[in-house]
Image: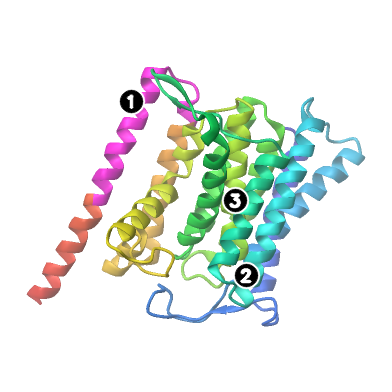
Amino acid sequence: MNAGTVVSAAGALAAAAWLTGRLCSMTAWLRPVDHPNERSLHTRPTPRTGGLAIWGGLIIGLAGIALLEWAGLYSRSADWPVRLETGVWIAGMVVLVGLVSFLDDRKSVPAGVRLAIHTLAASGVVAGAGLVVPAVTIPTAGAISLGWLAVPATVLFIVWMANLYNFMDGMDGFAGGMTWLGFGFLAIIAWVGGHALIFLLSLLISMAAAGFLFYNRPPARIFMGDVGSVPIGFLAASLAVLGVHDGVFDLWVPVLIFSPFIVDATVTVLRRILHGQKFWQAHREHYYQRLVLVGWGHRKTMLVEYALMLATGTTAVLYVHVTDATRLAILATWFIAYVALAQGVRKIELKAKSQRVAV
């Protein structure tokens, strides 16, 4: 990492913080308001297009890199020309998803239309950039080829990540924190692995999210909205697939990093499906929502989730450098840990309920 990269990262953070502050006070056209309802956790109307500031920070960071290169203060890595073409494809699809999400923030877009565009964009990453997850590696057992399922499975993974990120954006500082820490850990692994594109994009989006968090931490003055959460989830999945495709890491690495979101959203959706509920409708059944509602509040729940993110991210960094047997042990340990955490949330709810009954 050279000085130019550090300067650009600092620029992304500062720009995102400044833009977020401006969005908190701009006209209603640019900051549609999220009004409290029976399915939300906030208690006052709050602007919900803070994601624009994160993207603005990323753009400023990239512009800084370009300016420093023009001035001869930044040099590209050897793989940059090839990866730049891939980056353009990913960026184009992220913009497409972001535009639809911005419209959805301002004026609700039908779920079917959103899903169709998400699928189209994910297909663009797979077909246009040629990115696909050909196999899933099981430590000590080897790679299991997906065969003809590789393409639809990759598209499904990208679409699901985009939407689950949106599902999990329901608590002050939560999605912003996952973006800050998650992409930060992804940047570390890409830097060690020598992948310039993943490193640079991850670092800049992480720093931009850190700038956004100045105004999004509890009590939040602004939310990132769909224009932030959906394309950020899309970008996370696209960079994950790129890393797998280029041999930087196997799929378990980004899954571990973003597992605080992936596990909560996936388990909650599956549970709602099994109970015959419409999983796409807004609700308050995610584990983080249940902790807030049981009395933990936004700040305590957020800090516990941050600790979980730090633990999974650190484990993901270690995962890259250990033996297959240790990798299998890591995955097994986290599986058991998440089962225990789910049971822990249930016990907290039962205890709170019994205390209310006693009173």
Locate residue 183, reporting x and y percent. 57, 44
**Closer to the N terminus: mark 2 or mark 3?**
2
Amino acid type, label 3: Phe
At 77% across and 54% down in the image, what residue appears?
Answer: 60
Residue furthest to the left in view is 358
Q: Of the residues tagged 1 and 3, which is closer to the observer?
A: 3
Q: Describe the element under mark 1 as helix, strand or loop.
A: helix
Could you tell me how far apart the alpha carbons at marks 2 and 3 are, in whole angstroms?
A: 17 Å
Question: Residue 198, percent across and down?
Answer: 66, 37
Amino acid type, callout 2: Thr
The residue tagged 3 is: 234
Q: CA distance from mark 1 to mark 2?
A: 41 Å
Report the number of discs: 3
Residue farthest toward the right in the current orientation of the protein: 71
> Label 1 belongs to which residue?
329
Residue 324 is covered by the magenta coloring: yes
